[in-house]
Image (cartoon, rainbow, N blue to C red):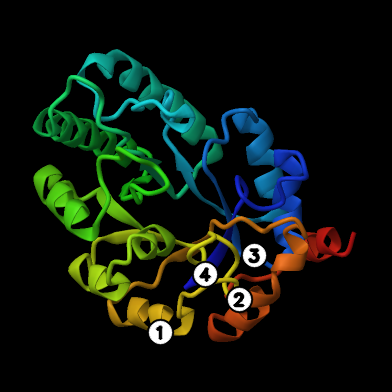
Amino acid sequence: MKIAANLSMLFTELPLRERVLAALRAGFEGVEIQFPYELPAVALKEVLELTALPLVLINLPAGDLMSGGPGLASVPARQDAFDAALQEALTYAAMARPACINVLPGRLAEGVSREQALDCLAANLRKSAETFATLGIRVLVEAINPIDMPGFLINTPEHLDTLLRAVDHPNLAAQYDLYHMARQELDVAAGMRLLAGRIGHVQFADVPGRGAPGTGELAFPALLGALRGSGYSGWLGAEYKPGEEGTQASLGWLVQWQQIFPCTRQITAAQRELSSF
């Protein structure tokens, strides 16, 4: 397993382009960005090539989801807006080349039944999986806890399991967030076992404060062992709030984790030079 920095949560005191450089210097092996669209795709591609860091994950544009609305993916009346978001993400991804793209299910919209929302979501996930397969980019779908995001449509491993079975597409997998599962006091390891072989990406933060590992109650060594036991060998995305001390001061956990998951990338001369600045 390899560790990526979520640049929407970490190094936020810097412009987005400079966060990629900061992640390199901190020792991360890759980066992920929730919504990178403020930065032109060509500019992101340039800094990724400069640092030789892979872009692990971005999200499909989600409309008004982050400001409290239902988003796009499960709202039948917003199908045109979802299709436009899909095209925007496809154009961006063709240049930036993320390994995965995450489609957020969104909240249950007013006047829409849960069954209607799930049918709409399944159809949009199938369309997305088919569309991004042409670029070799895997599509993910994520469960989010309803405490932090009330009304969110998909919350649990069981919800993900049902949804993946309904879509039944080889280019669709689960994004499994340890924080969102633990925030609901679910059995996080049991969820891994349920979704074994269908987890495409993992994110983490400690509970309850969504801080760095070691600031809360999660037993990360046991959970990382359970991940391995489920057969997962992909990326771990650090998606946590570093606190007032800033990202660099929050990275004590990273050295410990890198002893468990030694860096596998070949460090280039250019990376060494960038890291030394």
Give the residue furthest to the right. Answer: 277
Q: Which of marks 3 and 1 is nearer the N terminus?
A: 3
Q: Distance between the residues labelled 4 and 3?
A: 8 Å
Residue 31 place in picture, x, y as percent: 59, 54
Point out the tag, 4 or 2, that comes first from the N-terminus: 4
Q: Indicate the secondary structure of the residue bearing disc 3.
A: loop
Q: Is residue 268 visible?
A: no
Q: In this view, does 208 lie to the left or right of 73?
A: right
Closest to the camera, between mark 1 and mark 2, is: 1
Secondary structure, mark 2, is loop
Q: Name the residue under label 1.
A: 222
Q: Which mark is residue 28?
A: 3
Please tell me whether mark 4 sits on a helix, a strand or a loop: strand
Q: Distance between the residues labelled 1 and 2?
A: 21 Å
> CA gap, disc 4 to disc 2?
7 Å
**Image quarter in which the C terminus is found:** bottom right
Q: Where is residue 8 in the image (x, y as percent from the top left)?
A: 60, 45
Q: Say few, some or many: other residues with alpha carbon within 10 Å of mark 1 (under 14 / 14 to 19 / 20 or more).
A: few
Crowd rating for badge 4 (residues with CA inside 10 Å; few <14, some 14–19, many 20+)? some
Dividing the picture into quadrants, the one containing residue 41 is top right
* Relative height, residue 135 to residue 244 (above, below): above
Q: Name the residue under label 4.
A: 2
* Label 1 or label 2, whichever comes before in sequence order: 1
- Residue 10 in percent (x, y) is at 66, 53
Query: Which residue does the numbered mark 2 point to in the structure image?
Result: 263
Q: What residue type is labelled 4?
A: Lys
Name the residue rendered at 72%, 51% in the picture. Answer: 11
User: What's the residue type where badge 3 is placed?
Assistant: Phe
Q: Are marks 4 and 2 in contact (CB under 8 Å)?
A: yes
Which residue is painted at 71% across and 54% down in the image? 51
- Which amino acid type corresponds to the residue marked 1 in the rendered image? Ala
Helix, strand or loop for disc 1 = helix
